[in-house]
C-alpha cells in the first residue's frame, strides 16, 4: 500500500465529475487500499478517489468502532453510489482533507438510503443516519465535483475565503 497525495482546494480537478467504475479489478483494489492508507495517515474518516486525483466514482468511509478505532472491519468501500431516499435535515460541523484546517457548519439530510457496490462488484443497499449519513453525502459530493464549502451561505462563504487566504499566507511564511 502507498500513501497518496491529497489534492487541495482550489485545484481544478476537485471540480471534475467522476466517471463510473466499470472494472472491479486489481487496479481498483490497489486504489482502495492506497486510499485507506492515505486517509488513516491524514486522520480522516472518508476519502473520495477524486481527492487523490483519480476521477472515478469510488470512496471510502471509516467512522471507527464504538471507541473510534478505525480498522478494515469498520471500513465501508463504496463504488458508484446512488442515493435512493433522503429524510429530515441536520446541521453538523464538517471538515475536509482537501480543505485542510477549515471547519464549518453544513446542513445535510439526516437519513439516507444508498445503493452501491463493493470492491468485488457486489451490490449493497445501506441505510445511514447521523454522521454516517453526512459522510456518504460529503464524499459523494466530491464525486460530483463539489466541496462542502459550496454549501455555505453567502456570509459564511466570504468568511471562508478570508480565512483561507490567511491560512495560505501562514503556510507560505512557514516554508521560508
Image: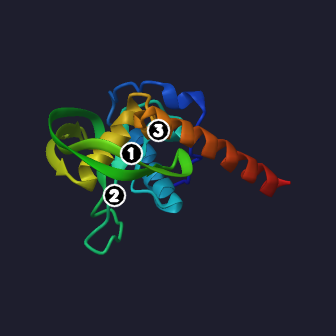
Residue 58 falls left or right of residue 158: left
**Image location (x, y in percent) of residue 85:** 13, 35
Q: Which mark is residue 149?
A: 3
Label disc, if present, on residue 76 of the rendered structure? none
- Would you call the spot at circle 1 few (<14 residues within 10 Å), some (14-19), or many (20 or more)? some
Residue at 43% in and 54% down: 36
Crowd around label 3: few <14 · some 14–19 · many ≥20 (10 Å): many
Q: Residues within 10 Å of mark 2 (few under 14, many from 20)?
A: many
Residue at point 51%, 32% (across, down): 14
State the residue position of label 1: 29
As measured in the structure, the alpha-carbon distance from the residue carrying label 2 to the one carrying label 3 is 22 Å
Q: Element at badge 2?
A: loop
Q: Give the image location of residue 153, x and y in percent.
A: 42, 35
Q: Earlier in the sequence, mark 2 or mark 3?
A: 2
Query: Mark 2–mark 3 contact, CB under 8 Å?
Result: no
**Residue at the image point whose x is 33% and y is 70% from the top:** 68
- The residue indicated by pointer 2 is 62
Task: Report the mark closest to the observer, 2 or 3.
Answer: 3
Q: Is residue 168 above or below residue 19?
A: below
As drawn, is 4 to the left or to the right of 47?
right
Q: Is residue 24 above or below residue 75?
A: above
In front here: 22 or 103? 103
Q: Is residue 141 above or below residue 78?
A: above
Amino acid at each position: 500500500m502507498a500513501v497518496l497525495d491529497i489534492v487541495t482546494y482550489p485545484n481544478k480537478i476537485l471540480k471534475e465529475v467522476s466517471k463510473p467504475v466499470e472494472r472491479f479489478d486489481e487496479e481498483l483494489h490497489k486504489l482502495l487500499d492506497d486510499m485507506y492508507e492515505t486517509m488513516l495517515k491524514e486522520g480522516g474518516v472518508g476519502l473520495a478517489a477524486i481527492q487523490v486525483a483519480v476521477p472515478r466514482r469510488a470512496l471510502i468511509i471509516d467512522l471507527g468502532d464504538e471507541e473510534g478505532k478505525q480498522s478494515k472491519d469498520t471500513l465501508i468501500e463504496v463504488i458508484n453510489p446512488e442515493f435512493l431516499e433522503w429524510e429530515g435535515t441536520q446541521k453538523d460541523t464538517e471538515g475536509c482533507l482537501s480543505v485542510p484546517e477549515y471547519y464549518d457548519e453544513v446542513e445535510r439530510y439526516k437519513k439516507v438510503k444508498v445503493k452501491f457496490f463493493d470492491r468485488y462488484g457486489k451490490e449493497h443497499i445501506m441505510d445511514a443516519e447521523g454522521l454516517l449519513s453526512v459522510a456518504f453525502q460529503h464524499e459523494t459530493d466530491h464525486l460530483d465535483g463539489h466541496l462542502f464549502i459550496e454549501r455555505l451561505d453567502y456570509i459564511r462563504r466570504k468568511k471562508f475565503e478570508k480565512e483561507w487566504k490567511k491560512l495560505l499566507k501562514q503556510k507560505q511564511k512557514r516554508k521560508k
